[in-house]
Amino acid sequence: MQQALIDSLRGSFQGRLLHAEDDVKPFLSDFRKRWTGTTLAVVQPDSTEDVAAVVRWCVKNNVTIYPQGGNTGLVGGNIPDSAHTPNIVLSLQRMNRILEVNPYNNTLTAQAGAVLQHVQEAAAREQRLFPLSLGAEGSCTLGGNLATNAGGIQVLRYGNARDLCLGLEVVTADGEIWNGLRGLRKDNTGYDLKHLFVGSEGTLGIITAATVKLYPQPAAQMTAFAALPDAQSAVRLLALAQQQLSASLTAFELICGASVQLVLKHAPQMRNPVATDAPYYVLLESSDAEGEAHAAERFEHLMSTAFEDGIILDAAIASSLSQSATFWQIRHHLPEAQAADGENIKHDISLPISSIPEFIERGAAAVQSKLPGGRIFVFGHLGDGNLHYNVSAPAGSDAAAYQAMRDNEKTISRAVYDVVTQMNGSISAEHGVGQLRVSSIAHYKSPLEIAMMKRIKQALDPDNRLNPGRVIAPPHSL
Ligand SMILES: Cc1cc2nc3c(=O)[nH]c(=O)nc-3n(C[C@H](O)[C@H](O)[C@H](O)COP(=O)(O)OP(=O)(O)OC[C@H]3O[C@@H](n4cnc5c(N)ncnc54)[C@H](O)[C@@H]3O)c2cc1C
């Protein structure tokens, strides 16, 4: 039966089909090795028409579809579910062509499987900037970025993937092709359908290509790494930087002292850019159109005002692009350092920026009530009110203590999310829902919001064929 399905599927489209155990293995577990799945086959179409043909074959044979890009997602939406068989992984990786860079319209159109870094490089070759930037940019794909509405380090200035998207091409759940690849900044002709698919995590349609916004490349970039006495000072520094640099401020990352120590422990070749041990650090960057001297003057003025006002204890300003890269390495190495340190419970939350210092205190109390001695690693995109708030077992824990933390994960996360919700925050800022947070969003969103989401799912994917079990819990009937 399985072989007959594979043979029939192979004949239905032009691209590559993988089904040998070793070939499909890399597509069946995630970056953190937290989820594994099973599949009939991994299908890698070469064209949009191929994607549509595969979807129509799945409709005919009642097979479910798990779309996948670079497989860097952190919430398990990218991994097929053993509960929904037979299924295929529909991998967009071979559809990776840049179709057009238009420097006059400031747009780029690419197939969904184009790797984010290649999209950035294609824009740069035309002296343009595609500003979406995140730690996984060497592997994640444009389609995956849009499907998850990815954020990253420059949202503060340029917005998230949704803000950068002008048009989409999508294969619907019944195998039709919608060509919405418009490079328009204004288009008020009814419901803006692309926004349904952005952030839908592959549950409403398969993104096969996208048109995105480009910007002029900055003439000068300044980066600083600053030590701060507390989280409130980070909020004050952000306000001061926004006041003095306005739109030039492109990144503002908070890193707690424990997180910096963790990176230095697991990557001893790295150095803390400042000599001062502090409870918090901020990595901030500005991008100017007006040249280096002007940028340096404004940036140095900002840092000296912050120092005089007692907002920062110490700071290092990068004197070259390579020094700036070493500052960023500390930030980018955090996920790896955490993985090397043992398991942790990840939370990707957002809050009103002004509430963040209070949240850090209340969140710590909530964690300690459920996991006494638990270690908290806080870092993230403070400029967007987005914290990665990760909880680890107490220092020196043995395997049994880690198991106890795992068993208690839901209770610990609920304690954190209760505080987030009481403070008008969101329990998923940029990573999405996937399978990790399906029950949590059902708990925290209002019944009306969940009902509207189910109606949209029901309208666009009535057979629950696309990424079932992700984002909203079945059944999707009204
Ligand atoms: C080291 C590291 C750092 C990260 N940093 C950030 C960060 O700063 N900000 C951030 O937002 N995220 C971050 N992420 C998460 C991740 O990189 C992003 O979510 C990324 O956008 C996923 O892209 P992908 O191509 O890997 O998608 P995948 O992981 O393959 O898929 C993610 C989801 O999108 C769906 N999907 C993928 N492609 C398509 C498509 N063409 N059509 C429809 N659905 C599709 C999948 O079904 C799945 O639900 C990070 C991840 C890692 C490993």
Image (spheres, grey):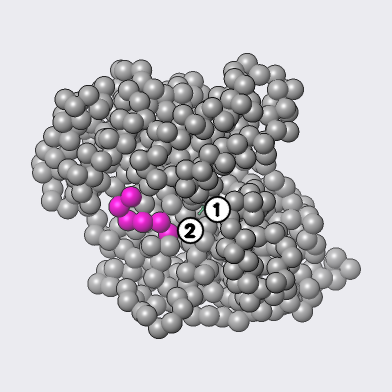
Dominant SS in magenta? helix
Secondary element under disc 2, as helix, strand or loop, is loop
Indicate if the residue with disc 1 has its beta carbon within 8 Å of ligand 1: yes
Q: Would residue 445 be visible to someone looking at this image?
A: yes
Q: Residue furthest right?
A: 1
For the residue with label 2, is its CB less than 8 Å from the closest atom of ligand 1? yes
Q: Measuring 37% from the left and 43% from the top, which residue is drawn there?
A: 353
Residue at which label 1 appears: 432
Residue contact between numbered discs 2 and 1, judged by CB atoms under 8 Å: yes
Q: Amino acid at mark 2?
A: Asn
Q: Which residues are magenta?
A: 156-161
Query: Considering only vertical position in the picture, is 325 above or below 111?
Result: above
| Image spot of residue 287 (x, y percent) | 23, 47
Question: Going 23% across and 40% down the picture, which residue do you hit?
Answer: 241
Q: Residues within 10 Å of mark 1 (few under 14, many from 20)?
A: many
**In which quadrant is the C terminus drawn?**
bottom right
The number of numbered discs placed on residues in the rendered structure image is: 2
- Rendering quarter of residue 161: bottom left
Looking at marks 2 and 1 on the same chain, the residue that comes earlier in the sequence is marked by: 2
- In-front residue for pair 22/139: 139
Which mark is drawn over residue 111? Answer: none
Image point (47%, 47%), residue name: 424
Q: Which label is found at residue 149?
A: 2
Q: Gap in Å between the C-alphas at discs 2 and 1?
A: 8 Å
Q: Identify which amino acid the numbered label 1 is placed on.
A: Gly
Label 2 packing within 10 angstroms: few (<14), some (14-19), many (20+): many
Q: Nearer the viewer, residue 88 or 275?
A: 275
In front of the other: 467 or 121: 467
